[in-house]
Amino acid sequence: MDYIDSLRIFRSVVEARSFTRAADMHGLTTPVVSRAIARLEKRLGSRLLHRTTRSLSLTETAERFYEGCRRVLDELDALEADASGQTREAGGVLRLVAHTTATVSRLVPLISSFKRAQPKVRLDVTLTERPVDLVADGYDLGIVLPFMLNNDTTVTRLLERITLVLAAAPAYLQAYGRPVHPDELAGHLFVSMPPSLRKPTLTFRIDGEERIVPFRHDVVSNNPVFNREMVLQGFGIGILPAVLVEDALASGRLVAVLDDFEIVDSEIEIRLAYTTRTLLPAKVRAFIDHATAFYGEAGQGLPAVQA
């Protein structure tokens, strides 16, 4: 294993915060990664990592060395890609993670149209609703909700805003009454996202002023489709994406609640996320451009911003 390989392994260990994940990223075993780091430390004459059974941390030397290492490897990748033409033709495996529910109506047509436009790119798609770390988890891109990102070196691009609505089943409203003012929500139950993902409050704008209204819940889940079904069963008022309930509202199986009152932050954002690298592989750049154009047809799409 040469010096450059050792630098790449060191970078992966730092970014993944794990010897095991770094080994998976390089197709190596964990002991091979450990030996590579040990040889690098011997060459530098300084300890780089503090490692226990539960955690991994960088020494002060490693923090300085990582920044220089990252720059050198990015520049080397750029030189190699330019020489081999990788920047001009998309190919290889593109690993994409997407929020299961928020992207369900868009993902298949998006992926289908991208695959037709870039037949040499192979897709490895993971659907989840949990937080992700693109680097540590080995993803090239994510189509995610903001709460899913836990790495501050991620670049995001707004793709779409989804409106949230309050809705309840007729049976629930018959049993508990239909609220006519936000203050009445204190007497109602909600089917909601977990408090770790969404605070159990709603903010309304009333007469030009914002009013925060807390609510109670007996059922919570991180899946809006499950929440919709529980609302349909009469277990409470739901705070649901409009696209998931439009048919139920039209058929009368659900009834809009307090739709005459303005809810502050009544939208959720779908964002395209990717790591900050000096050079983006052609397959990643191709998908960014394609997804931006695809969602842009619906009137969305904004410049990239730091997460």
Image (spheres, grey):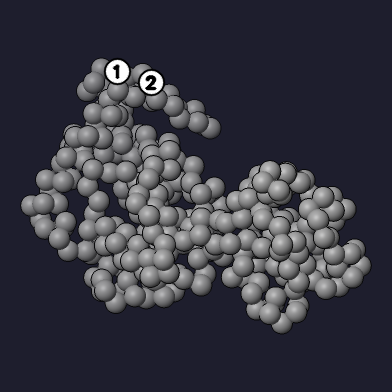
Circle 2: residue type: Thr
Return the residue nearer the eye: 176 or 23. Answer: 176
Expressed as whole percent of the image width and height from the top left, the position of residue 201 reads 72, 47
Expressed as whole percent of the image width and height from the top left, the position of residue 114 reads 32, 71
In the depicted structure, whether residue 107 falls above or below residue 284:
below
> Residue reaching furthest right?
175
Q: Is residue 263 left or right of residue 234?
A: left
The reply to whether callout 2 and callout 1 are in contact (CB within 8 Å) is yes
Circle 1: residue type: Ser
Residue picked out by circle 2: 59
Return the residue nearer the eye: 66 or 143. Answer: 143
Q: Residue at x 17, y 63 (%)?
A: 89
> Residue reaching furthest front?
207
Query: Helix or strand or loop: what does disc 1 sit on?
Result: loop
Residue 180 appearing in the image: yes
Q: Residue at x 85, y 53 (%)?
A: 184
Expressed as whole percent of the image width and height from the top left, the position of residue 104 reads 52, 69
Q: Mark 2: few, some, or many residues within 10 Å (few <14, many ≥20)? A: few
Q: Is residue 162 left or right of residue 186?
A: left
Q: Is residue 236 left or right of residue 24?
A: right
> Residue reaching furthest bottom?
251
In the depicted structure, whether residue 126 falls above or below residue 153:
below
Residue picked out by circle 1: 46
Q: Is residue 66 left or right of residue 241?
A: left
Q: Quadrant of residue 8?
A: top left
